[in-house]
Amino acid sequence: VKHPQHFFPHLPVYWKEVLEPYFGPMEQFGDFTIGYRGSAQFIVARDTIRSRPHSLYQDLYTWTMTTPMDDFWSSRMLEYTWHVLFDIETFPLLR
C-alpha cells in the first residue's frame, strides 16, 4: 500500500504546516486517501464544526490564501482532508 504522499507529494507539507498542530503526525493515519474521493461538497453537523478550535479555521484560511502551492494542488489538499478534519473520531475505524 502506497502512502498518500506518493499520489499527493504536497500533502506532507500541507499537513505539517496546517494540520499537525491539531491532529498530530500524519503517519498515524496511514493512507487516508484510499477509497476516498475528494470533493468540495460534504455534509457535516454544526456541532462538529464548532467542536474544532477557531484557530484551525483561521490557519486553514491563512494557508489557503498565502501558500505558494499551485491552486491545483492546494485545493486537493483540502478536498482530501475534509473527512479527517470532520470525522476524525470514526475515521480510524474505517481503515
Image (cartoon, rainbow, N blue to C red):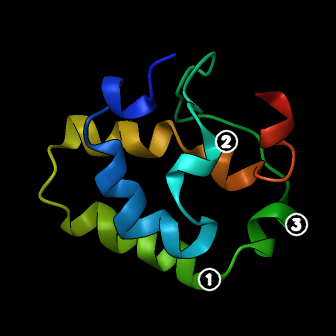
Q: Is tag 1's residue or tag 3's residue first in the polypeptide sequence?
A: 3
Return the residue nearer the eye: 66 or 26.
26
Read off the residue under disc 2: 83
Residue 60: image location, x then y, percent: 44, 67
Say if 4 sits above or below 69 in the image. above
Q: CA distance from mark 1 to mark 3?
A: 13 Å
Q: Is residue 54 left or right of residue 75?
A: right
Residue nearest the viewer, comparing 56 with 2: 2
The foreground one among 7 and 81 is 7
Quick one: label 2, few (<14), some, or many (20+) residues within 10 Å? many
User: Which residue type carries mark 3?
Assistant: Asp
Q: Between tags 1 and 2, which lies in front? A: 2
Residue at horizontal 16 percent and vertical 50 percent from the top: 69
Q: Residues within 10 Å of mark 3 (few under 14, many from 20)?
A: few
Give the label on residue 47, or none: 3
For label 2, the SS is helix
The residue mark sitting in front, 3 or 2, is 2
Identify which residue is drawn at 54% across, 44% down: 81
Residue nearest the viewer, comparing 84 with 29: 29
Q: What percent of the width, then of the height, locates residue 33?
A: 54, 27
Element assignment for label 1: helix
x, y (%) of residue 78?
45, 46
Residue type for callout 2: His
Residues at marks 3 and 2, CA–CA distance in whole angstroms: 15 Å
Q: Position of residue 43 (x, y in %)?
A: 76, 40
- Say which residue label 1 marks: 54
Report, in whole angstroms, how far the alpha carbon at label 1 lies from the one at label 2: 18 Å
- Can you say whether 68 is above or below 7 in the image? below
Residue at (34% x, 23% y) in the render: 7
Pointer 1 local density, CA inside 10 Å: few below 14, some 14–19, many at least 20: few
